[in-house]
Amino acid sequence: MIRPAQLKLIARAREAVASDPDEFAGILRRCGGVDTVDALTAQGFARLMDHFTVIRFQCRQRPILSATTRKLIEATAQQLSLSPHVYAADLRGYGGVADLRDLGGRGLIDLLSRWEQRGLDVAAFVAARRTITPAKVRLIQVARKRNAMEDKRYYSMLQGYGGVVSASDLDGRGFDLCMAFLEAEGFEREPLAVEKPGFGRRPGFASPEQVELIRALWREWSGSEVEAELNTWLERYHRASTLRFLTAASAGKVITALKAMKGRAQARKDVQLAGRAVT
């Protein structure tokens, strides 16, 4: 189920962190829920790469900031009427990077601080990014307590991987990276449900890749990992009681619908942010 490009990225990460075979096998089981790289699901691959990210492997294929946040930054630069030259100068001078894909959480905070002087409503920007649920905030607090993490290290984590100063302002990408960091620090995270994607390839039904993409889009749109909620939506709008019974033709329609829902949600946030910036 894992693609050749993803295999190459894992190999690069292993080389960068000098992970010996036994150590990597333990990381693979803990983060990916499998014994071999070839058996990784999309979710397992993401958790594995998030682990490598928080132990200092960074690459443009897996940026610290989400694609949604990067688009929001670009939209904000336009709303502030920044010229390409000024935008690039601010990105280098305050974000510390030349390419937006290299921007980290602390760089984002410094960049927003500069743009606040240019008229940005920072509170509106933070609100436009925020997608975390109360349950996930509680999980971070539980992990912090179990790790006996000092305040300085905790807030450094939030700033570095989330670009926020409070867990309640995290987006989905920031939450995932913070959980990966807390896990690397010793928190025993809930094991990956490896049986979840085990439908295999069945003629006429959604492929494993389609199933994983639907799950990922649903998590990004709803902020929920409860599959029962996805199944309820599928039954109501696509006449399939679960992903197991989703046909290949219907899977394409579901993916299109979820992408449209994500796009509309982001558009509403952009309009909201633009309105607040004007006022």
Image: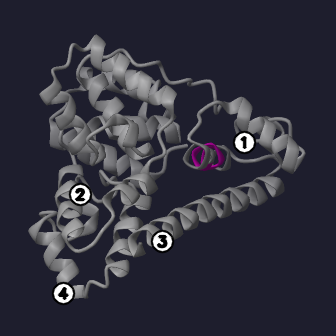
**Distance (Cα) linking label 3 and label 1:** 47 Å
Mark sitting on residue 201? 1
Label 2: state its secondary structure: helix
The residue shown at (18%, 51%) is 106
Q: Is residue 147 visible?
A: yes
Which sits earlier in the primary sequence, circle 2 or circle 4? 4
Position of residue 196 measured from the top left corner of the image (x, y, whole percent): 63, 28
Which sits earlier in the primary sequence, circle 3 or circle 4? 4
Label 4: state its secondary structure: helix
Eye-nearest disc, 2 or 1: 2
Q: Mark 4: which amino acid?
A: His
Q: Mark 1: which amino acid?
A: Arg
Residue at the spot of label 3: 275
The residue shown at (26%, 83%) is 82
Q: Residue furthest front?
A: 279
| Label pair 2/3, CB-CB below 8 angstroms | no
Residue at the spot of label 2: 108
Specify whether 258 is left or right of 81.
Answer: right
Q: What secondary structure predominates along the stretch shown in magenta? A: helix
Which sits earlier in the primary sequence, circle 4 or circle 1? 4
Q: Mark 3: which amino acid?
A: Gly
Judging depth in this view, the residue of 18 and 135 nearest the camera is 135
Mark 4 nearby-residue class (10 Å; few <14, some 14–19, many ≥20): few
Specify whether 56 is left or right of 44.
Answer: left
| Label pair 2/4, CB-CB below 8 angstroms | no
Position of residue 253 measured from the top left corner of the image (x, y, whole percent): 78, 60
Residue at the spot of label 4: 85
What range of the chain is rendered magenta? 212-217
| Label pair 3/4, CB-CB below 8 angstroms | no
